[in-house]
């Protein structure tokens, strides 16, 4: 049986299609083909995620949604898009009362009962769901995501969490709301980070939607504004889908049966038994094809794991015969994702350079291992040997074979590059490995004034000096560096939590001097960028280090 994690995109009235997709997943569970171990949803997708996590019969859920949705349509029908309504919104009153949304959510889940010891009790709280679930909302007050997790926030009412995630600004909540928590789609309408955050290797299945085949050719003010929002959200969804696929997951694109705001058709027609059956029949072949691709990936990963183990064994034997000492390692990031929108060099993926300088511990060096990180979201170019270079310290190029391998480490997957020299050499050498990584520092890419870099000594026995170097856009102005572990108060809670867990294996450093940073200007100066760095002189094996980069001195 294939274990999977499922994430649902938001979509307004497209909830009906998401429900149909989730019901097909439930069918496949009943057939013994898959088992869902976690669900994540945002906005309308949060309702689908909770439905799937409840393991309640789907026809009952469809009927409840039809009845509750019909009542909700009555509230929608009373919306008058007039100057009077615009004035009401301007004064902080929402278009629709939030009670309409709450009544819908409460009605959908009201028929579900769960066991509490020997008693049947109503399903009201996240912790009562049969499958772990995370629901994503957005805090306007703190400019960050709010994630309600059934494990950590089990006492949270489903009604409250889902309403936060679905609270469309100006429609259900405005600036007069007490906590300023709104629709999670504001922070990203396809929450890949939340479904991929855990360290397990369970494959991720995402439910998104096909792109619209026709675009409006003429636009008024309202249509233009809507198109701007749609463009931003569609671009973010595509980026999330790419990250899911880069992490070994798959995205199943669902048919566009309804427009986002077409609640009338979605509820009255889509939840009709015959129409709902037809939607399910369209989805099942797509989903079965996606799961087939999953199974092929699982088989390929097993074969690669065996190959990786053999390569690592060969490497360790070679190092026994030709030991080496690391003189310096470095992680150099060029922050292209934080450039101005009009800069032609702006990109969502940043260039990341890992390098290491080594010298023979005895007579010669024959192979090396470069730690790429504890992540699967790294992509490598197809340019052959152009994305890595091995040379002597006087820049004489050396020939070598490179192999990318994975190895389990503390419940995570460590990614290594193994290099085997064509001929052993008796002098110091340098390895430079280039990759492209999506938003290496996402806080900077999204406009924050602080972000961080973290590195890890992948050597098994040797203490290593490490540099963390950042090429940043010159429009940032001056920047400063601080030790990461000692200044977690500067980061959002989600980013700081994983760093705190590494406190027992942490090494502090210091800001690099101008002369030390200038060493990195010799062969590599990205256009319109300045450089700053953090140096850690002695990082023990399997230990971490890191720096916070702050805009402003």
Image (spheres, rainbow, N blue to C red):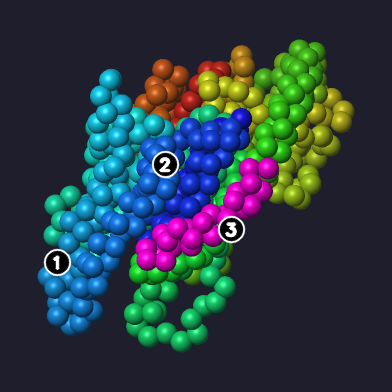
- 273 is within the stretch colored magenta: yes
Residue at 18% x, 83% y is 83
Number of numbered discs on residues: 3
The answer to which quarter of the image holds residue 518 is top right
* Residue 282: numbered disc: 3
Q: Nearer the viewer, residue 406 or 275?
A: 275
Say if the magenta span includes residue 460. no
- Judge left or right: residue 442 versus residue 138: right
> Which residue is rendered at x = 31% and y = 31% of the image?
114
Q: Which residue is mark 1?
A: 93
Foreground label between 1 and 2: 2
Number of other residues with Cα within 10 Å of mark 2, as a class: few under 14, some 14 to 19, many 20 or more: few
Q: Is residue 242 left or right of residue 501?
A: right
Q: Which residue reaches farthest right?
A: 423
Question: Mark 2 highlights which residue?
Answer: 57
Q: SS class of the residue under badge 3?
A: helix
Could you tell me which quadrant the N terminus lies in? top right
Q: Of callouts 3 and 1, which one flags the residue occurring earlier in the amino acid sequence? A: 1
Please state the horizontal and vertical placement of residue 237, each as a whole percent of the image: 49, 57
* Relative side of 41 to 333, left or right: left
C-beta proximity under 8 Å, tags 3 and 2: no
* Viewer-nearest of discs 3 and 1: 3
Magenta-tinted stretch: 266-292
Quadrant of residue 113 in the image? top left
Relative to residue 419, is residue 470 depicted above or below? below
- On the image, the x and y values in percent for residue 175 come to 17, 61
Return the x and y of residue 521 as percentages of the image width and height: 58, 48
């Amino acid at each position: 049986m294939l274990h999977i994690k499922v994430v649902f995109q938001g979509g307004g009235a497209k909830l009906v299609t998401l429900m149909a997709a989730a019901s097909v997943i439930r069918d496949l569970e009943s057939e013994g083909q898959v088992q869902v171990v976690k669900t994540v949803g945002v906005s309308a997708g949060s309702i689908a995620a909770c439905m799937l996590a409840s393991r309640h019969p789907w026809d009952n859920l469809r009927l409840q949604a039809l009845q509750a949705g019909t009542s909700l349509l009555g509230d929608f029908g009373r919306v008058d898009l007039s100057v009077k309504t615009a004035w009401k919104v301007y004064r902080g009153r929402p278009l629709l009362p939030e009670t309409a949304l709450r009544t819908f959510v409460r009605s959908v889940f009201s028929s579900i009962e769960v066991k509490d010891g020997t008693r049947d009790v109503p399903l009201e709280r996240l912790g009562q769901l049969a499958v772990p679930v995370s629901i994503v909302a957005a805090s306007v007050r703190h400019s960050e995501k709010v994630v309600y997790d059934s494990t950590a926030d089990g006492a949270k009412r489903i009604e409250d969490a889902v309403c936060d995630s679905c609270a469309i600004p100006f429609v259900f909540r405005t600036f007069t709301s007490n906590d300023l928590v709104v629709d999670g789609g504001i922070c990203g309408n396809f929450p890949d980070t939340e479904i991929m955050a855990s360290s397990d290797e369970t494959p991720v299945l995402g439910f998104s939607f096909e792109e619209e085949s026709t675009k409006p050719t003429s636009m008024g003010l309202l249509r233009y504004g809507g198109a701007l929002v749609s463009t931003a959200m569609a671009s973010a969804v595509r980026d999330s889908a790419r990250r899911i696929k880069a992490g070994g997951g798959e995205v199943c694109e669902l048919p566009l049966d309804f427009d986002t705001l077409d609640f009338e058709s979605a509820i009255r027609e889509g939840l009709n038994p015959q129409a709902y059956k037809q939607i399910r029949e369209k989805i099942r072949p797509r989903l079965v094809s996606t799961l087939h691709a999953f199974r092929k990936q699982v088989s390929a990963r097993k074969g690669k794991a065996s190959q990786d183990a053999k390569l690592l064994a060969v490497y360790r034997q070679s190092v026994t015969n030709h030991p080496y000492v690391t003189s310096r390692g470095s992680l150099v990031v060029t922050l292209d994702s934080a450039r101005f929108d009009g800069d032609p060099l702006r990109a969502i993926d940043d260039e990341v350079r890992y390098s290491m300088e080594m010298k023979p511990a005895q007579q010669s060096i024959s192979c090396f291992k470069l730690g790429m990180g504890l992540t699967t979201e790294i992509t490598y170019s197809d340019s052959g040997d152009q994305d890595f270079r091995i040379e002597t310290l006087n820049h004489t190029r050396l020939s070598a074979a490179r192999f990318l391998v994975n190895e389990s480490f503390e419940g995570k997957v460590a990614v290594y590059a193994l290099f085997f020299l064509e001929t052993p050499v008796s002098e110091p050498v340098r390895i430079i490995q280039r990759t492209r990584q999506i938003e290496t520092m996402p806080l900077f890419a999204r406009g924050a004034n602080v972000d961080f870099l973290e590195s890890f000594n992948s050597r098994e026995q040797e203490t290593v000096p490490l540099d963390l170097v950042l090429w940043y856009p010159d429009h940032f102005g001056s920047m400063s560096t601080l030790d990461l572990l000692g200044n977690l108060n500067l980061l959002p809670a989600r980013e700081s939590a994983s760093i705190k867990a590494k406190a027992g294996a942490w090494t502090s450093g210091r800001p690099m001097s101008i002369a030390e940073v200038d060493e990195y200007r010799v062969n590599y100066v990205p256009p319109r960028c300045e450089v700053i760095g953090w140096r850690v002189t002695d990082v023990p094996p399997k230990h971490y280090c890191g720096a916070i980069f702050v805009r402003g001195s």
